Image (cartoon, helix red, strand yellow):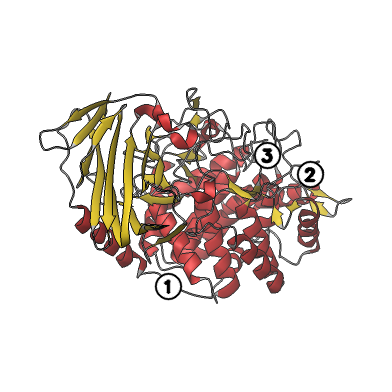
């Protein structure tokens, strides 16, 4: 059985990532990309679906984990009754190789250890042939994939797995590596493991030194930035939402989705997180990825794309995997890529507007794209859509979608006014006014004193908390205050915020879900904008306490079972963490800057 989600740590090479639990088991790895088929998939099935565990032979009496400062190099210290050993895990940053590097170092005494590697390609379905190479290494091969195991201790094949038993004494080190390559290529060369681990450490430290620390939560912000960088494709600049698929929003439930893709809804938040932390080049790469991804006919813009801008993300089930703790089905691909979500137009227009305001100047071709998008939005903005949360209960006139349509028209108008661009500004102003009137008249429930999830409804949605941040209304407007009070009353669960009530018909799915962590950060942002700074800080630190021992957050938190749920680690949670920390401690606050008229 897989470990609890919070028991995992991420290592990666920015093209893909592996999830390692506290017992030294890699239970998830897809190669060579995040969205490739996994060769270790026991996270979503059984050990027979693939894993690689290195640990003491006897159960440790204590386990302590940490990342090397400023890096994605993981260190797990095992204490046993025989002594202490340190497991160092990382992936090479060489773009020409997908390599997992592992070193067992002796710290005290003599610790008997073991390594067991079970490789199963095609999401744990394809049992490979194992061959011993002339140089003594072992090769797994099936279909188009091969993995080559190198080690400094003898390895034996037992029941289709590769196993080693060895003692590590104080001062000694035992090295392992696994390298992936296409099966039709020669077996890849073995890395110089110790040297490569130090090189990886220095590359991450060099990157982290560009971080501009601010406020009392510098360590948490840096760890979140490193996590974002780990999820950023170094070639395209696209940032995947998570390295995993189908980690459930409800344990045992059906809300299990593939998050190994890039969502447009995160665009402006990500821009602020990177720009205000000193990573202007990464923000520029993110903007350029977005422009390439949405290139083409504006009516074909999707809500998400592959890391290189791929459009076809067909959703299908993997029936041979039992799911995380029995949470079925396991999905590959995401059908939400074909949904209509009007809010993405506002996200794209806002990102490009804010980028121009924050030193990433626009150009004539970029403005041509913006005009095409806003002119297309002018023809569809008043239609029902699927909403920000990709619900599967049918289209509605979602209030947040209309707010973001207003944002799109507003940013188009302001781009003409502020930057001297050309365009039918009077028509855009008229559309902006129409959108505002519709939202204020149809999206506001006077009896509740609050904006509501969809026009004419009486249910709430945490996305309404973004209204002041995008500049639709001031944070202290009575309607915003009423909405915040309604969210506090109806969407708060044990001090955290749900996206919406999953029991309503709008959801279209069975079961429940956890509290979406970004929404709690959004509420803290509104508190800050309203001058309720003590409440904002208290809520922010409450969410911070949910991070696992190495500073990572998933998508959601289950307040009943008190555990992290959803895909992990989740980029959107860490982006929200970064921005809320800045809103609480920085002179230039992202929320205030974004809302300025």
92 and 412: which is toward the camera: 92
Q: Secondary structure at mark 2?
A: loop
Q: Residue at x 50, y 22 (%)?
A: 319
Badge 3: residue crowd in 10 Å (few <14, some 14–19, many ≥20): some
Q: Residue furthest right?
A: 447
As measured in the structure, the alpha-carbon distance from the residue carrying label 3 to the one carrying label 2 is 20 Å
Q: Which type of secondary structure does the marked residue at label 3 adopt?
A: loop
Kindly check if marks 3 and 1 are in contact, taking CB atoms under 8 A apart as contact: no
The residue labelled by disc 1 is 212
The residue at which mark 2 appears reads as 459
The relative height of residue 208 versus residue 154 in the rendered view (above or below) is below
For this view, does 290 lie left or right of residue 455? Answer: left
Q: CA distance from mark 2 to mark 1?
A: 41 Å
Is residue 162 placed above or below 275 in the rendered structure? Answer: above
Question: Residue 115 location, x and y as percent?
Answer: 32, 43
* Residue hosting label 3: 382
- 396 vs 447: above or below: above
In which quadrant will I find the C terminus?
Answer: bottom right
Q: Tell which tag, 3 or 2, sits nearer the viewer.
A: 2
Cβ–Cβ below 8 Å for labels 2 and 1?
Answer: no
**Real-space Cα separation, disc 3 to disc 1, in angstroms:** 42 Å
Q: Which mark is residue 323?
A: none
Foreground of the two, 383 or 186: 186
Residue 478 in the image: state x and y as whole percent.
Answer: 81, 63
Which quadrant of the figure has residue 466? bottom right
In primary-sequence order, the first of circles 3 and 1 is: 1
Q: Secondary structure at mark 1?
A: loop
Res. 404 in view = yes
Q: Residue at x 64, y 63 (%)?
A: 542
| Quarter of the rendering containing residue 138 | top left
């Amino acid at each position: 059985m897989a470990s609890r989600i919070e028991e995992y740590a991420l290592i990666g090479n920015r093209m893909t990532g592996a999830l390692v639990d506290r017992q030294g088991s890699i239970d998830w790895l897809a190669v060579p990309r995040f969205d490739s088929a996994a060769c270790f998939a026991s996270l979503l099935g059984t050990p027979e679906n693939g894993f690689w565990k290195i640990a003491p032979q006897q159960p440790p009496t204590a386990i302590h984990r940490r990342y090397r400062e400023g890096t994605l190099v993981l260190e797990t210290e095992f204490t046993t009754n025989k002594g202490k050993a340190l497991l160092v895990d990382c992936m090479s940053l060489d773009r020409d190789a997908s390599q997992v590097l592992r070193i067992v170092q002796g710290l005290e005494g003599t610790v008997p250890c073991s390594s067991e590697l079970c490789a199963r390609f095609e999401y744990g379905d394809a049992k490979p042939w194992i061959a011993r190479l002339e140089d003594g290494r072992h090769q797994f091969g099936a279909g188009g994939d091969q993995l080559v195991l190198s080690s400094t201790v003898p390895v034996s094949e037992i029941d289709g797995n590769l196993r080693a038993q060895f003692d590590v004494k104080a001062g000694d080190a035992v090295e392992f590596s696994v390298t992936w390559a296409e099966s039709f290529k020669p077996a890849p060369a073995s890395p110089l493991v110790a040297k490569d681990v130090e090189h990886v450490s220095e590359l991450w430290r060099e990157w982290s030194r560009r971080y501009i620390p601010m406020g009392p939560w510098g360590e948490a912000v840096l760890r979140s930035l490193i996590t974002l960088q780990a999820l950023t494709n170094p070639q395209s600049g696209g940032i995947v939402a998570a390295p995993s698929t189908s980690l459930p929003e409800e344990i045992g439930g059906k809300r299990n989705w593939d998050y190994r893709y890039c969502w447009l809804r995160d665009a402006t938040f990500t821009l602020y997180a990177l720009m205000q932390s000193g990573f202007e080049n990464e923000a520029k790469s993110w903007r350029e990825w977005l422009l390439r991804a949405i290139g083409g006919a504006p009516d074909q813009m999707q809500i998400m794309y592959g890391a290189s801008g791929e459009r076809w993300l067909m959703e299908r089930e993997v029936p041979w995997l039992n799911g995380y703790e029995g949470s079925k089905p396991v999905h590959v691909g995401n059908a939400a890529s074909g949904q209509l979500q009007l809010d993405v137009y506002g996200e794209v227009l806002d990102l490009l507007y804010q980028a121009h305001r924050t030193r990433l100047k626009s150009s004539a071709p970029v403005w041509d794209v913006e005009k095409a998008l806003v002119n297309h939005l002018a023809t569809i903005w008043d239609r029902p859509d699927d909403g920000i949360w990709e619900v599967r209960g049918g289209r509605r006139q979602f209030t947040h979608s209309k707010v973001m349509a207003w944002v799109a028209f507003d940013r188009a108008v302001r781009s003409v006014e502020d930057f001297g661009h050309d365009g039918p500004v009077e028509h855009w102003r008229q559309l902006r006014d129409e959108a505002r009137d519709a939202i204020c008249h149809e999206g506001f429930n006077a009896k509740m004193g609050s904006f509501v999830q969809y026009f004419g409804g009486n249910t709430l949605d945490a996305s309404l908390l973004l209204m002041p941040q995008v500049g639709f209304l001031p944070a202290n407007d009575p309607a915003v205050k009423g909405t915040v009070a309604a969210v506090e009353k109806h969407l708060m669960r044990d001090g955290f915020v749900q996206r919406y009530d999953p029991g309503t018909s709008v959801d279209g799915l069975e079961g429940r879900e956890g509290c979406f962590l970004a929404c709690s950060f959004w509420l803290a942002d509104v508190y800050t904008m309203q001058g309720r700074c003590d409440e904002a800080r208290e809520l922010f630190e409450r969410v911070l306490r949910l991070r696992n021992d190495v500073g990572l957050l998933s998508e959601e938190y289950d307040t009943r079972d008190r555990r992290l749920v959803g895909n992990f680690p989740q980029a959107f949670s860490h982006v929200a963490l970064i921005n809320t920390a800045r809103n609480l401690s920085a002179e230039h606050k992202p929320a205030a800057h974004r809302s300025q008229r």
